[in-house]
Amino acid sequence: MNGRRSRPAAFTLVELLVVIAIIGILVSLLLPAVQAARGTARAAQCKSNLRQIGIALHHYHEVHSGFPPAFLGEATGWLPSWSWTTYLLPHLEQNGLYDDLQVMSAEFGGGAPFATTPNDQTQKVLPVFVCPADTGPNLNHHKSGHAKSSYRGVLGNETQLVTSHALLIRQNGAFFVNSHVSVEHITDGSSQTLAAGECRLDPGPTGKRGAIWAGMRGPTENTLWLSDSAWFLNAEPDWCINGAGEQAFSSQHPGGAQFVLADGSVRLISQTIDGTTLERLAARNDGEPVGEF
């Protein structure tokens, strides 16, 4: 009788290669699903951010009987000013930051405490203003180096270039200079009017598009308009709505960009939406039927 125990057979080279191949196939099958799940989670968080912004807009409306202005100042001026997002800070559990900025005691520029120079307060990244799919830098160096925002307000649906440096903007959106738009002013219906949408920051060194939550350098830096004549859709994965280059609502979500409407609801606006429909969604009082979107 042989007392020696038999050893288990070792993997042959062929068997090892088969196992490695199977693992590779499983990884290739699972990786897209994992990436899709992460993309879905990022889109859900972005939607939650916009929903919070919508709630904050209505809290502000309850206190002030209207939505905040795009900025305060002279309609023809380009001096920096606190933006509509800054006025929402107390309604987004940022009372301390709001007080530190002294929003109601001074303008953003022209001798204001912080003017256009970045500081600890204006460089503070606020998650509610940042879409997790917006992979650009946290500081928007295209806009004075302040902390970025992934969202811009909707000015309206039409502009006219008066001079090479001046824009005449129809004041028919949810926000415009010195605006105080109430729900009663949104005669097209708050569920048919866009309030704000995504505008991702280009991850490149120039940081085009995007916005900053703290303020603005000009009348369209934290807001954008929507015009059928300026309609443009970029290629995947950088979906752009209304115009190429830096002046465009855009996102890295597949299929479109997310918007909060004046009633506080959040919708993904498809990149295939008809330009006229999008233009009508931007106006609060043009009397034109929107239709399905």
Image: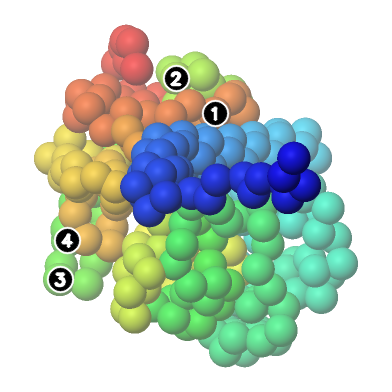
Helix, strand or loop under label 4: strand
260 or 221: which is nearer to us?
A: 260
Q: Are marks 4 and 3 in contact (CB under 8 Å)?
A: no
| Percent position of residue 282, x then y | 37, 33
Helix, strand or loop under label 2: helix
143 or 160: which is nearer to us?
A: 143
Which of discs 2 and 1 lies nearer the camera? The answer is 1
> Where, quadrant-wise, is the N terminus in this rendering?
top right
**The label number, if any, that marks residue 166 in the structure image:** none
Amino acid type of the residue tagged 4 in the rendering: Val
Evaluate whether residue 54 shows in this view.
no
Q: Mark 3 vs mark 1: which is more N-terminal?
A: 3
Residue at image x 34%, y 17%?
Answer: 293
Which residue is tagged 2? 192
Amino acid type of the residue tagged 2 in the rendering: Gln
| Percent position of residue 55, x then y | 71, 35
Give the Cα separation between the discs numbered 4 and 3.
7 Å
Amino acid type of the residue tagged 3 in the rendering: Ser
**The label number, if any, that marks residue 266 in the structure image:** 1
Q: Relative to 258, does residue 223 appear above or below in the rendering?
A: below
**The label number, if any, that marks residue 162 in the structure image:** 4
